[in-house]
Image: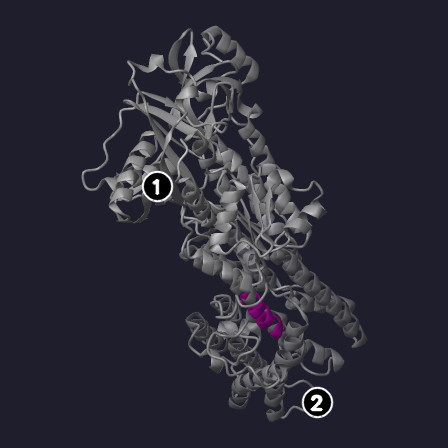
Amino acid sequence: MTAVAGLSAEEAAGLLAADGPNVLPQMRPVPRWRRAAAEFTHFFALLLWVAAALAFVAGMPQLGVAVMVVVIVNGVFSYAQEARAERAASKLRAMLPSQVRVKRDGRAVRVDASRLVRGDVVLLCAGDRIPADVDFAVAEACTVDESMLSGESEPVAKNAGDSGYGGTFLANGNAEAQVTATGARTRLAAIASLTAAAQPPPSPLNNELRRVVRIISVVALSLGGVFFAVSLLAGTSWRDAFLFAIGVSVALVPEGLLPTVTLSLAMGAQRMAGRNALVRHLQAVETLGSTTFICTDKTGTLTQNRMSAVEVWTPEGTVRVRGQGYAPEAGITGSPAALQRARRLSHAARAASRGRIVQQRGEWSAEGDPMEAALDALARRLAGAEGPPEAEVDFRWGFDPVRKRESVVAGNALLVKGAPESVLPLCLGSTDRPACAGALEDMAARGLRVLAVAERRLPDPGAGNSQWPAEPGLLEEQLTLLGLVGLHDPPRESVADALRTARTAGIKVAMVTGDHPSTAAAIAAEIGLLGPERTVIEGRDLPDDEHMLGALLDRDGVVVSRVSPEQKLRVARALQLRGHILAMTGDGVNDGPALQEADIGVAMGASGTDVAREAADLVLLDDDFATIISAVEQGRATYANIRRFLTYHLTDNVAELTPFVVWALSGGSFPLALSVLQILFLDIGTDLLPALALGSERPGKRILQRPPERRHLMDTALMVRVFAVLGPVEAVCEMTAFTLTLWLAGWRPGAAFPGPAVLAAASGAAFATVVLAQLANAFACRSESLPPWRLGWGTNRLLLWAVAVELAALAGFLFIGPIAAMLGHAPPTMSGLLAAVLAMPALICADYLHKRIRAGGKGLSRGRGAGPA
């Protein structure tokens, strides 16, 4: 195809009016008011709203206001944490250039990219972003970086007649390309709509919280009904019995659970940020801890994305290069003859390349193709202090996937670099062929990417570019092989250990990449990811049936190469269909749909696109796979912490319900130890801070030495601990302090209720007992297997502060007259206070005995922090 003239201004205006501007369609975002409303209308929030309304109906406005404050504070906090809404489609628009050069009326002009139309001819040079879908009319040594769409890390050669896509960019060469599709009709727009359509599944924590709320709701409403019936049987009026039942139901709702969960997730997110993992959605914190399968990209996540030439084989011997990244300084070993040949080779390879290394702010980095930049670094390293001479290139035949090589004419020499299978057959026969084949096989087996470099002396350097043919043809014959170059993109140092940790933690890992299968397999083998079955699958070979696909992929160490965005999405769905909690990494536009679909979308923060980051739940600020494992560790700790404070909250509920049970069983003849308002102050005023402190516990040393948690938040072990051990002990201590105060004041069961002052002091003793028992309970709940002294009393400093604040709050509630009067209690007597204090050792001892029984007398002597939740 030859160059085309382009459109006239009138033609362009007509097409613009017909097709519309070259902008991606805007996905209508969820209005802010709807996102805010969602934080106040989910099931648990609705339950609390109903509880507040019933409190007003029951004539307890203080209770109603307090519950409303809890809902509002938690909703505002959650909305603030989730304020960064999904903006994947809007970020896609930023990928299009604002101005482009086009042919209009036979001359080159600059126009706004939004005014580009079908038929326009755009003029592109290296580094330009392609503004729409195009067909190349003229392509001079062009390569296009399509990694944002295809996942392929290597630039793709483009010739006249080939297609290009909006959002990609020209890595090398110059081109003229005719626009074939704009705006909503581009490939980029199709992926944008696919990303928007993908909906993440509910998180495991959401499912578990819904289950907990359902259980609590059923229990609260059922007991409210029971107390309503008992009240009627005790002779209470219909109205009073109804109001009493409402009060009991409200009291049983753990008002502090929702803000505690939210703040615990926020603390986990803050810790992850300190370890280079930025959480975009709070639920992702816990979901990470439940992860059972990780699909990871290769380049930049498992590797450093810093290609280096580490070895040069020549007929005279092997030269080994030890250098850091792209820095020109390196250690070189090899015989003098081999070094001399290696220098010739590196100069030839550099001349046949356009990528270079540049120094910015003291750091060397690649400009252009990373592989070609590595060849530039190799030439500089071999040339010594004087640096390599820059070859004068007279003509260039660019790399293309058919020839698999690139050739240039420099003076009187033809210089060729390319794939060994493409270059070696063109070289003259040599006795070194067996040695070359052995070197090639050895390099490939070690995961190196191998290039062959050759040259040919031309009889006449030529008088100009016009004498050279469009294709090198017979020029690329009878070449002299200079040698082989082995290039390596080193894996991150932390990856091997991270993979071992993942397997110990019961997490399967697969590589899902757009790279060539042999390259992917070699890297996977080098870092220890490739499984014993050495399963390497190309995207085109994936079965169509999702069940078959899931069965094929559901193993550790699978490598899936050459995947398209749609195939990556299918991989995610197939693994989720088999029950996996899936974490999927990605960095390009093509990864957006899969990141949305996965339970946890993990985007690259350093090298990834805005699209991937906005579609993800977690952003790795350092692009390191090991950071995912660190985030999983914190996620598991967060799940364990939620179980800790759930145990803590429910234990308190047992103690809060007991006075009502005793009153009901006595037919109303036994005084009520606590009022509904006192219970609310226990839930919010004293219990909340220790619960939050439990939510800040750091991961135990062995938290990644077991499979992901598959148990419910409220499982049998938790419920036995709450309802058969901790709760009953706390309740017995509470009722003992209450009854002891009444007994010493002369009251006996069956007698008329004592005076208000005695009842107030007894209620104060019961209130103080619950608070002090909960202090001990907070330390007991730090572990499901270890007693507090094994963990260290002071290892959770936030808990110490919480206990101090709770003691101060208790003193205020008891001894500040107006507050005590509002709550209906008074400071306890000395005997009542002594009984309250004894509740602390009683609960700690009961917890210790229960843990010994569960452990069979073993396992309670482990070191600090070693135990599970």
Question: Circle 2 is placed at which residue position?
Answer: 749
Q: Residue at x 62, y 87 (%)?
A: 736
Residue tagged 1: 315
Q: Position of residue 485 (x, y in %)?
A: 37, 41
Q: Nearer the viewer, residue 139 or 720?
A: 139
Q: Is residue 269 magenta?
A: no
Q: Which residues are magenta?
A: 641-651
Give the distance between the C-alpha atoms of the residues marked 1 and 2, in whole angstroms.
105 Å
Height in image: 235 above or below 136? below
**Residue projecting furthest to the right:** 233
Which numbered mark, 1 or 2, is in the foreground of this view? 1
In percent of width and height, residue 212 lies at 66, 63
Residue ID at (41%, 24%): 476
Does residue 438 appear to the left or right of 207 in the view shown?
A: left
Q: Amino acid at mark 2?
A: Pro
Figure check: 395 above or below 700: above
Q: How is the image coloured?
A: one colour
Whole-percent x, y for residue 364 in the image: 29, 42
